[in-house]
Amino acid sequence: MHTTARTISVWVIGAFFIAAGAYHLIHPRPYLAMIPTYLPAPAVLVAVSGVAEILGGVGVLLSVTRVVAGWGLIALLLAVFPANLHVALHGWPGVDLLPWILWVRLLFQPLFIWLVHRFCIAKFPAQ
């Protein structure tokens, strides 16, 4: 892959996760509503996931931490999947989305995992 395309992809991934993490911290209410009731301390979980997204987003922007940050983001995406499945099954209180959209959202997690792996972890042959 051309170095410029990979660089742009990494910056888009980093910016996406930084923005998503910041949104968790600035507007936690929708994320609090999606935490299953069997999980403790929803506010802490939302804050931790937001900080993890920000750190992962910054981490993929730095070549020295990119691979570790990429694996961290993949672990985070796997960890939050149950909350996304929960809202697909039971609805998302306070968020007005059609039920089918909640199911389509689940498809984005494997896509994000693939993108992070492809552009932040996988080795590319020298161009």
Image: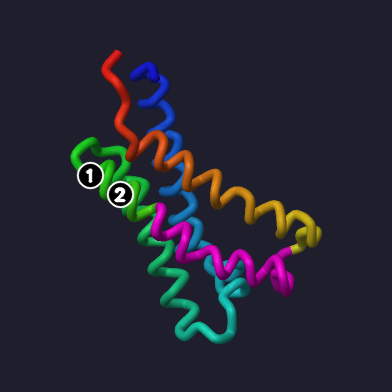
Stretch of the chain drawn in magenta: 74-95
Residue shown at the point (55%, 52%) measured from the top left: 109
- Residue 37, image x, y percentages: 58, 85
State the image quarter where residue 52 is shown: bottom left
Q: Mark 1 points at which residue?
A: 65
Work out which quarter of the rendered image holds the C terminus and state it.
top left
Q: Do the residues labelled 2 and 1 touch (CB within 8 Å)?
A: yes
Residue 2 against residue 59 in the figure, above or below: above
Residue shown at the point (76%, 62%) measured from the top left: 96
Magenta span: chief secondary structure:
helix
- Residue 21, image x, y percentages: 44, 56
State the image quarter where residue 3 is shown: top left
- Residue 26, image x, y percentages: 48, 62
Residue shown at the point (63%, 66%) measured from the top left: 85
- Can residue 10 be seen in the rendering of this structure? yes
Q: Mark 2 points at which residue?
A: 69
Q: Nearer the viewer, residue 1 or 58?
A: 1
Residue flagged by tag 1: what amino acid is it?
Thr
Number of other residues with Cα within 10 Å of mark 1, as a class: few under 14, some 14 to 19, many 20 or more: some
